[in-house]
């Protein structure tokens, strides 16, 4: 148990040293999911040759890794932020 107390982490934003148990950082979980709504299809979409469209999509996917394909649908990240970076990030996560 003592070894865990000596373990150090770095802030993912500024690189500051973070020490578990000292209360000087935040553990942030980020979950990103692709739009879960069914696609909106038009009459033109339905008139297209579905077999050709599926083949085009499969051809695009052949050049991608499993990770690249999965990242387009679901991504989960865990980051560590020092108190200062967390305060800035939580107010403007996209900034």
Image: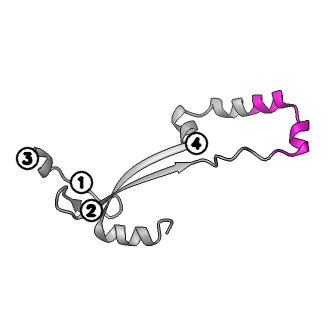
Q: Where is residue 95 in the image (x, y as percent from the top left)?
A: 49, 69
Disc 4 on helix, strand or loop?
Answer: loop
Give the CA distance from mark 2 to mark 4: 29 Å
Q: First in sequence: mark 3 or mark 1? A: 3
Q: Do the residues labelled 2 and 4 touch (CB within 8 Å)?
A: no
Image position of 86 (left or right of 43): left
Q: First in sequence: mark 1 or mark 2? A: 1
Image position of 76 (left or right of 18): right
Q: Which residue is pictured at 76% across the width and 28% down the height?
A: 55
Name the colour scheme: one colour
Q: What stretch is highlighted in magenta?
A: 41-56
Q: Residue 20 carries which label?
A: none
Q: Mainly helix, strand or loop, the magenta region? A: helix
Q: Are marks 1 and 2 in contact (CB under 8 Å)?
A: yes
* Residue 31 against residue 50 in the figure, above or below: below
The number of callouts visible is 4
User: To which residue does mark 4 refer?
Assistant: 73
In magenta segment, residue 59: no
Q: First in sequence: mark 1 or mark 4? A: 1
Give the CA distance from mark 4 to mark 3: 40 Å
Q: Position of residue 12 (x, y in %)?
A: 34, 58
* Residue 95 against residue 71 in the figure, above or below: below
Q: Are marks 3 and 1 in contact (CB under 8 Å)?
A: no
User: To which residue does mark 1 refer?
Assistant: 9
User: To which residue does mark 3 refer?
Assistant: 2
Q: Which residue lies furthest to the left in this view?
A: 2
User: To which residue does mark 2 refer?
Assistant: 25
In magenta segment, residue 52: yes
């Amino acid at each position: 148990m003592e070894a865990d107390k000596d373990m150090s982490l770095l802030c993912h934003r500024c690189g500051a040293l973070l020490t578990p148990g000292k209360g000087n950082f935040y553990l942030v979980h980020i979950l990103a999911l692709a739009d879960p709504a069914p696609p909106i299809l038009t009459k033109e979409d339905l008139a297209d040759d579905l077999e050709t469209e599926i083949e085009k999509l499969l051809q695009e996917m052949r050049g991608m890794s499993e990770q690249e394909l999965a990242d387009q649908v679901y991504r989960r990240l865990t980051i560590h932020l020092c108190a200062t970076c967390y305060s800035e990030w939580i107010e403007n996560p996209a900034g």
